[in-house]
Image: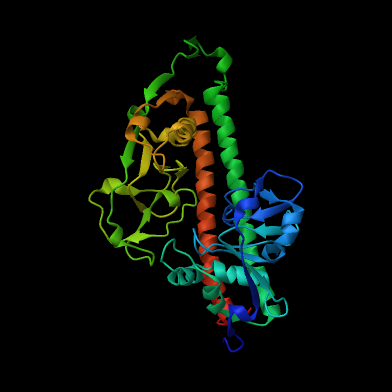
Amino acid sequence: AGVWVRRVRRADFLTIKNSFSPGHFRPGFRPGVSTYRAVQICGATSEFVYVSEEKADALRANTAARGDLIFTQRGTLGQVGLIPGDSRFERYVVSQSQMKLTADPSKADPRFIYHYFSLPTVVDEIKARVITSGVPHINLGILKELQVPLPPVATQRRIADIASEYDDLIENNQRRIKLLEEAARRLYHEWFVALRLPGHSQTAMAGGIPHDWRRVNLYEFAELTMGFPFQANAFNGEGNGTPIIRIRDILDLSPVAWTTESPPSPEYWVERGDFLVGMDGFFHMNHWAGKAALLVQRVCRIRPRNMLYRGFLAQALFAPIKHFEATISGATVAHLGAKHLRSIELLVPPVTSSTCLKQLNLLLDQKLYLVEMNQCLKQARDALLPRLMSGALAV
């Protein structure tokens, strides 16, 4: 196995170009040529900024087309993006701190190269070569020296097809997750904000709300636990010890760091379905999925005292947490504190509304199931691809 695999320097089959300074970006300007930024690589936004056609022509060397790969040079290192064949635009101007790579189609399939450099082991290899003086970064020289397994192009395409099948399943589940989240938001608003629960027309009202509802402080309604300040020198990225949950892990629910330090109390364990809130910068919110992990400083876990309200809790907290995110300001970054959380009052329905509350729980459980399915698909893909790419398994 593996006799056909050559490890080739990236410079031998890719053309690599730096980016340009963003001084000519024009947010929302159309017509023009879109820029390709780090937020497009990670999928954080679908919004583009633009430069004029004339400026794009002058920056032709910094223009990326369909099939080109984009690497982050500084910031979130290890990110790689592929401009797909059905991309929204035909060309993009590569923004500052990105690098464009163009594959020689006679030697390399860009989808194969993309999947190779998306593998966790390869991302770790890139990070191991980071230049740490000043802002941590990589450069063209580092990229050109990296070695890539390069089977025949036809084999690369078959491997890329297999990887794409996994990606399609993951993307389909992501769409289903968004539909479930939207359904939960709409039902919560209909039932618990507009107060149009089944049978609401026969419900007695008092002070503008159903007579058996009550206003409850968040701390009375739920148990709140702030993360523990684990020692940073005990953190590692090799999977040694116990996974930890930091603010950056709340959205994608995929820990990237572990600690060998033991928690001082069982209260710092996070279980499946726990609701988490990030306390700095953007106050990210999500329910934890997957294996148990440890709660790190500046992440808050909120558990309803009655688990019938699991799905209700997240919906009820969304608006007040987003309000704090928009209004709290700090010298460098916004901080959500206990004083803010203690000010939250919730309008809580009685347990006799269990049919509606259970429906929100069902939607939440379906979402968690799909998130965990995606975690398994990613693990299977990332275990299979290296063996296919090395020739250890026949395609």
Task: Report the label total.
Answer: 0
Looking at the image, the residue that sits furthest to the left is: 264
Q: Position of residue 68 (x, y in %)?
A: 67, 66
Rendered view: 364 above or below 151: above
- Front residue of 65 and 58: 58
Q: Position of residue 236 (x, y in %)?
A: 35, 64
- Left or right: residue 378 compared with residue 103: left
Rendered view: 188 above or below 36: above
Residue 260 in which image quadrant: bottom left
Residue 342 in which image quadrant: top left
Q: Position of residue 136 (x, y in %)?
A: 44, 63
Residue pictured at 44% horizontal, 19% vertical = 213
Quadrant in which the N terminus appears: bottom right
Is residue 87 visible in the rendered image? The answer is no
Quadrant in which the C terminus appears: bottom right
Q: Position of residue 153 (x, y in %)?
A: 69, 79
Is residue 365 visible in the rendered image? The answer is yes
Residue pictured at 38% horizontal, 52% vertical = 245
Residue 190 in which image quadrant: top right
Residue pictured at 47% horizontal, 10% vertical = 207
- Front residue of 385 and 143: 143
Looking at the image, the residue that sits furthest to the bottom is: 3
- Front residue of 347 and 136: 136
Residue pictured at 46% horizontal, 52% vertical = 253
